[in-house]
Amino acid sequence: MSLISELKRRKVFRVAGAYAVVGWLVIEVAATIAPQLNFPEWVPRLITFVILLGFPVALVTAWMLEVTPEGVKMDAAGTGSKRIYVIAAVFAALALGWYIRDLRHAPQASPDDARSIAVLPFVNMSADPEQEYFSEGIAEELLNRLAQYPDLKVAARTSAFQFKGKNLDIGEIGRRLKVTHVLEGSVRKGGSTLRITAQLIDSRTGYHMWSESYDRDAADVLRVQDEIAGAIAKALESRLGGKAVASAPALKVSPEAYDDYLQGRAFVAKRRVENLDKAIAAFDRAIALEPGYSAAYSGRGFAHLLRPMWNAPDFQSALASARDSADRALQFDPDNAEAYMVRGTAEAFGRDAASARIDLDRAQTLAPGSVDVINMTGDVDMYFGALGEAERLKRRAMALDPLAFVHPMNLSDVLYAQGRYQEAIAAAKQSISLGARDTGLDRLVNASLRAGRAGQARDAVEQVCAMIGATSWTCETDRIVSLAAAGQRKQAKALLDELAGDFRDGKRPADTYVPAVLAAYYVEISDFTGAAAWQRKALDGGSWFPTFALVNAPGGAKLPEEMSADPEWLAVWNDPRMQDVMTVYRRNLVAWRASRR
């Protein structure tokens, strides 16, 4: 009897087929649900290996055993036994080889990964649940202090604080945040007394590297934070090598002022205009109690800087307040990194590119691990044409803040500006998976249209409109770009003209960034007269990013003359008020293009 006939008789082919189908289904299910259940990355890989290794076992078992009316029996040896064993051995060797190779190519911890830490929100042990902001504020301030160590990777607040109230293993938290050390603790505040406990844990082993309790007067809270940060730095220094940076002496502020300051920080973290207004009020109370409180001034400046980004209409006054607060902060502390970041960003929005570069570079030097500094600098770099540096900073922000949707969303913007639309789509989808909602879907719409994936764009538009309403700004503008991409420019222009007319006539809230964005949408329909008119409004009234229409040009960021020879269009970019910005933008964009060749 031939080997093929014997295999058929022993039902080996049938067993192999059934095993392959079931095994494939198990692998697919494991790969799909493992991330949702927060399983370690090696779990799907191990399941695949076990299934592959089980395949030759199933073949040999089917060959050797036979199902009879009397039960399962050993089949009499026939021709081809040696060959079937050799085939099974080959399959087993291939499975083992794949697994070993996969392990070798799996991401390995680098020496830099060992110098990484996450600070979890400290537990409020006080009798008053309203003191939650205080215990979280202590943890955030420790995080900010640790971020000033140049050789230490510190997970950002947005990601680390997502684990508040979740009963997860420290090892799992470390894996999800991609850090090897975790700091956790608790705060008990009662009257004028304060008790802070903190412990540093190796997330790979679960072992405690350091722990301490501090019983202090509430007025000593800043000094305690310095002690904790210094102790952690020394613990890591002895374990990993390197040298900790000496911190400045702790500032003496009243407990009441510090309490207001922490309230302000808690509101800034929540963003949105109503919370930013509460943050400003809290910082003002702290400053009233402590007129030399630099951190309160810079926090106030940051809140003012963020307001127009959340649709507050007072761009010019917000910008002036942000600058003034940053200047005051630097009077009292010349090394306040946040103040340099706020002032540098405000200078960029005010079209002073040279001063912005100096201040933002200084902020990065003082706080190399600050995600806020990295993120804001990356935004400025993108709109000043430094697309390579913007991408590097956005990826750095993602590494430090892996669970925040804003960074892959912003990376999608940078990749879009570079004309890398497939990668922009992937980044937009990642932001959506992390909770970006309509803002992430908006990126997905635009990148999909540029990539020629009309069906995906159409689905995303429908999701946006269902989520936030058919008359919302994002829904209508997504429909405009979809119509333009489909060649229906007349319909797109009619819808855009109506939308622009509503803003011009005051029928819609006049969000301060709208003129620059509207200019970009007129570019989409190749109406450069309309684009020039709205770009002129952006220039006259101020705009967060005056080069928005250039950076978001079809095919990737462009120079004005590459987009159109329309004299009105070129004139607005040659306006003397744009000279500094356009000199820097042109130089950066040309240099980036040269680096890509």
Image (cartoon, rainbow, N blue to C red):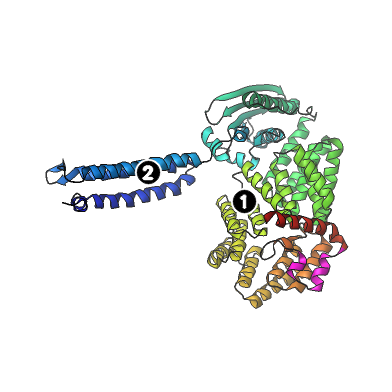
Is residue 5 in view?
A: yes
Amino acid type at circle 2 is Leu
Inspect the magenta stretch and tell me whether residue 459 lies in it: no
Q: Is residue 38 above or below residue 503?
A: above
Classify residue 232 as left or right of residue 250.
left
Over which residues does the magenta segment extend? 559-575
**In this rendering, position of residue 479 left or right of residue 12:** right
Task: State left or right for residue 323 relative to residue 502.
Answer: right
Say whether residue 565 is magenta.
yes
**Residue 432, position in %: x, y?**
57, 54
Residue 120 as seen in the image, left or right of residue 168: right
Identify the residue shown where x is 68% and y is 59%.
417
Q: Amino acid at mark 1?
A: Pro
Mark 1 Cα-neighbour bin, 10 Å: few <14, some 14–19, many ≥20: many
Residue at x-position 82% and y-position 58%: 583
Question: Is tag 1's residue or tag 2's residue first in the polypeptide sequence?
Answer: 2
Q: Which residue is mark 2?
A: 94
Residue identifier under label 1 = 408
Element at label 2: helix
Q: Residue at x 37, y 43 (%)?
A: 94
